[in-house]
Image (tube, rainbow, N blue to C red):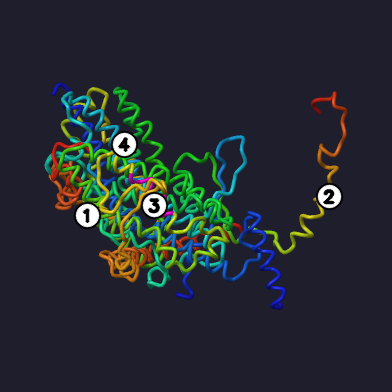
């Protein structure tokens, strides 16, 4: 059992229609990238959910660590001047 | 029946999909991985979808009250005209994929021609099915390569499957009377003309898969005339069970 | 980490869930949360793939082409659902192979209802209508559970499941409105599947061990008994509508509770089936283990081929 190589895990991203981004929709097992694409087609687009598929082997994804969320994401919280609501406009200006 | 040749011709096409779809359906829940299981069921569903279009058309041509299910499930063994290849059992996954591949190559070539049929219904069904069958062929070719050029064990099993099923390939190119009649009306496909392209494609994939092309020149035939291998009777007893045990009911 | 620090983290963790925040795979979580989730999600995944077998049993014998494609698509969906749920488990660091190992060795459980045989075509109706009906009651609230990957898998599952129960009920309608023989088939199937469906919603609250913690983690939103009551209340009128009789002499509308009272469930039978003594336990495992073992050389070949292909690619690149 121990030296046995199982089919690795892949992450699947599907574009539901042109104009929209690919979105992560799940994962699956496959021996190689061709099989991963085929499996993704068979598993995740049975109900016409997609027009384009990306697959990437899960181990190739670099993810941020939630333990660092403070330093990673909190510094952005108080930069309210990046948002339009920070700026005062006279009521007469309806759209800007 | 006014258009008996056309009726028979449609059955000749549809029965292949019916029997192969049924064989693939047997595997649901028993595949080598969940992903492969789902993929095989997809092929089965594609084939049954095609079958329904063909039989519905055939029923219309027959012009009596028969339905797609009557045609699918209420004929006798000798009245099914599928090729012997598609009724061969799921001996193991190599057999299943080899059977699929050997049929898919033919099926795609056939549909590409049927698309040009003067009969608009057949041409429309072919047009829709081509996309499905192109994918089947891609899927089965990939598996021929994986198993042929995988491990020693898989290579042997795939070689056995190809050797075992080879004898059923030539029948694909035999013409029936209905075939000849329909070809002359520019409705049917002249299957004899597909043979060369078929073996070219098959041989190329086998070679790429490090598999030997069988040398045997002795081929089995009979399916198109309703003379089947012993496997078909059992398949039909499953397929027809409900319609036989509970006749004349709706489900 | 000191005990106090862990305690602190745990308190924060529980507070996040109470605030309806989702927990994602890499977030810190108590070991018990992780284990409980692996257990529940894998049990759920196992139920999906073992659940393919009783219905798969009728694919080749479906009475019409229309029924055949519907059944094929439904059983295929179950494979898909098993796959989504195994994937959700894998986010917690346990592989699908390990989970299979637990199933095949008998260590992991699956829904015991799939240990009953499907003996007639009407069982396809009863299973879809009752078993999927009971499953949906359990599953819909899970779309909102605290663990992100589980919740997302359940959203997908519930969306796809919506045709399953209809598919079953439609079979029952057709039979119930058919010939006397067909109606009898339908009633017989209801008789056999009714009680196991009630049991499927789990032991009575008094006997259920995990409930309180599971409620907090939103792994469970209602107690087993409440779910059962909901199932009965919604199913009885559906049976009446098509002229079938629920096989329970004690079933009676309770005006005061605005719910049905119902008879005693045979919990002894339930526990016997859970322990492996149901009519089909051995066959179900044999089929699963068989498929896995017979598939081994196929999976190995695909890996070997993938490696060869990779090597060829690397050589070309040089």
Does residue A51 belong to the magenta stretch? Answer: no
Q: Residues within 10 Å of mark 4 (few under 14, many from 20)?
A: many
Could you confirm whether marks 1 and 4 are on the same chain?
no
**Of the numbered discs in the image, which one, if any, rests on residue C134?**
3
Does residue C234 belong to the magenta stretch? Answer: yes
Tell me the residue at 62%/59% (across/down).
Answer: C23
Which residue is denoted by mark 1 in the rendering? C119
Could you confirm whether marks 4 and 3 are on the same chain?
no
Cα separation between marks 1 and 3:
20 Å
Label 1's element?
loop
What's drawn in magenta, residue-wise?
A: C227-236
Percent from the top left, x then y, of residue B90?
27, 56
Cα separation between marks 4 and 3:
34 Å
Could you confirm whether marks 3 and 2 are on the same chain?
no
Which residue is denoted by mark 4 in the rendering? B50
Closest to the camera, between mark 1 and mark 4, is: 1
Closest to the camera, between mark 2 and mark 4, is: 2
In front here: C157 or B178? C157
Q: Residues within 10 Å of mark 3 (few under 14, many from 20)?
A: many
**Of the numbered discs in the image, which one, if any, rests on residue B105?**
none
Q: Chain of mark 4?
A: B
Q: Chain of mark 1?
A: C
Residue B179 visible in image: yes
Percent from the top left, x then y, of residue B150?
42, 62
């Amino acid at each position: 059992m121990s030296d046995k190589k199982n089919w690795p895990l892949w992450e699947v991203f599907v574009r539901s229609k042109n104009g929209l981004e690919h979105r992560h929709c799940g994962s699956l097992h496959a021996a190689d990238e061709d099989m991963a694409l085929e499996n993704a087609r068979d598993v995740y687009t049975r109900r016409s959910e997609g027009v384009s598929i990306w697959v990437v082997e899960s181990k190739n994804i670099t993810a941020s660590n939630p333990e660092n969320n403070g330093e990673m994401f909190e510094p952005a919280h108080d930069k309210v001047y990046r948002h339009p609501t920070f700026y005062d406009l006279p009521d007469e200006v309806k759209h800007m | 029946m006014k258009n008996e040749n056309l009726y028979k011709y449609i059955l000749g096409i549809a029965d292949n999909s019916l029997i192969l779809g049924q064989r693939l359906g047997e595997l649901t829940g028993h595949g080598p991985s969940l992903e492969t299981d789902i993929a095989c069921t997809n092929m089965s569903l594609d084939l049954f979808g095609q079958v329904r279009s063909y039989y519905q058309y055939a029923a219309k041509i027959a012009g009596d009250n028969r339905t797609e299910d009557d045609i699918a499930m209420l004929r006798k063994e000798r009245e099914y005209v599928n090729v012997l290849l598609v009724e061969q059992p799921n001996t193991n996954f190599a057999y299943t994929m080899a059977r699929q591949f050997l049929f898919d190559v033919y099926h795609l070539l056939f549909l590409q021609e049927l698309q040009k049929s003067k009969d608009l219904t057949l041409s429309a069904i072919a047009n829709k099915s081509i996309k499905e069958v192109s994918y089947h062929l891609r899927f089965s070719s990939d598996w021929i390569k994986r198993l042929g050029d995988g491990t020693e064990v898989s290579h042997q099993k795939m070689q056995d499957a190809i050797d075992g099923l080879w004898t059923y390939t030539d029948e694909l190119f035999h013409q029936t009377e209905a075939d000849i009649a329909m070809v002359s009306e520019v409705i049917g496909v002249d299957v004899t003309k597909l043979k060369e392209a078929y073996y070219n494609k098959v041989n190329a994939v086998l070679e790429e898969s490090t598999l030997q092309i069988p040398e045997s020149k002795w081929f089995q035939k009979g399916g198109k005339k309703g003379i089947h291998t012993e496997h078909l009777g059992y398949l039909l007893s499953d397929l027809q069970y409900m319609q036989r045990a509970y006749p004349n009911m709706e489900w | 980490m000191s005990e106090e620090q862990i305690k602190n983290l745990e308190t924060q963790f529980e507070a996040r869930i109470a605030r309806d925040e989702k927990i994602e795979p890499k977030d810190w979580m108590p070991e018990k949360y992780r284990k409980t989730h692996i257990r529940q999600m894998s049990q759920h995944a196992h139920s999906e793939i073992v659940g393919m077998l009783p219905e798969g049993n009728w694919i080749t014998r479906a009475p019409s082409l229309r029924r055949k494609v519907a059944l094929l698509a439904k059983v295929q969906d179950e494979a898909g659902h098993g796959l989504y749920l195994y994937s959700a488990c894998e986010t917690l660091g346990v592989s699908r192979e390990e989970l299979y190992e637990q199933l095949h060795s008998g260590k992991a459980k699956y829904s015991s209802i799939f240990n009953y045989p499907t003996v007639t075509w009407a069982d396809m109706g009863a299973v879809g209508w009752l078993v999927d009906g009971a499953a949906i009651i359990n599953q819909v609230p899970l779309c909102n559970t605290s663990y992100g990957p589980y919740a997302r898998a359940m959203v997908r599952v519930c969306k796809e499941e919506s045709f399953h129960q209809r598919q079953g009920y439609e079979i029952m309608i057709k039979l119930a409105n058919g010939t006397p023989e067909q109606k009898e088939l339908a009633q017989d199937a209801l008789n056999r599947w009714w009680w196991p469906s009630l049991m499927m919603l789990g032991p009575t609250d008094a006997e259920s061990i995990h409930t309180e913690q599971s409620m907090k983690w939103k792994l469970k939103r209602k107690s087993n008994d409440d779910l059962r009551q909901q199932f009965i209340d919604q199913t009885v009128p559906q049976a009446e509508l098509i002229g079938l009789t629920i096989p329970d002499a004690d079933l009676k509308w309770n005006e005061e509770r605005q719910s049905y009272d119902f008879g005693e469930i045979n919990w002894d039978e339930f526990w016997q089936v859970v322990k492996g003594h149901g009519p089909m336990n051995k066959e179900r495992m044999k089929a699963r283990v068989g498929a896995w073992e017979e598939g081994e050389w196929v999976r190995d070949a695909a890996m070997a081929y993938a490696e060869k292909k990779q090597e060829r690619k690397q050589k070309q690149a040089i």
